[in-house]
Image (spheres, rainbow, N blue to C red):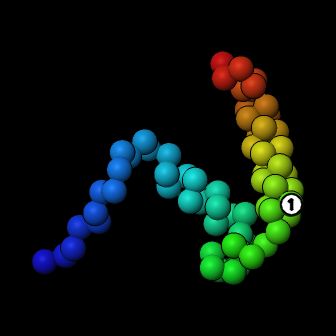
Amino acid sequence: MAKQKKNTGANLGFEDKLWAAADKLRGNMDAAEYKHVPFEEKMAEATELDATIKANFSRLGFDEGGS
């Protein structure tokens, strides 16, 4: 019998997207190694990813107000 994944809290529906974003930020680096990357570098990567996401939403016709 296959083991089921233990539910450790509320499933808000966006956890998989957050993990995918974290994987994209890390690139090919293992998560254990990524914890040693300086905070400033992580923030720069997150800011760049945020700008890309905003540009894509804008290109699709969405504004920052969510409409």
User: Is residue 57 left or right of 21 when viewed as pictured?
Assistant: right
Q: Tell me if residue 60 comes above or below residue 25 in the rendering.
A: above
Q: Residue at x 64, y 66 (%)?
A: 23
Q: Is residue 48 visible?
A: yes
Label 1 Cα neighbours within 10 Å, binned few <14 / some 14-19 / many ≥20:
few
Q: Residue at x 35, y 50 (%)?
A: 9
Residue 40: x and y, percent? Answer: 86, 60
Residue 19: x and y, percent? Answer: 56, 59
Which quadrant is the N terminus positioned in?
A: bottom left
Disc 1 is placed on an element classified as helix
The image quadrant that residue 21 belongs to is bottom right
Front in this rendered view, residue 24 or 37: 37
In this view, the residue farthest toward the left is 1
Q: Tell me if residue 60 comes above or below residue 49 in the rendering.
A: above
User: Is residue 50 left or right of 23 when viewed as pictured?
Assistant: right
Q: Which residue is mark 1?
A: 40
Residue 39: x and y, percent? Answer: 80, 62
Q: Is residue 52 visible?
A: no
Which quadrant is the C terminus positioned in?
A: top right
- Count of marks, rendered view: 1
The image quadrant that residue 20 belongs to is bottom right
The amino acid pointed to by label 1 is Glu
Q: Residue at x 71, y 74 (%)?
A: 34
Q: Residue at x 55, y 52 (%)?
A: 17
Front in this rendered view, residue 67 or 12: 12
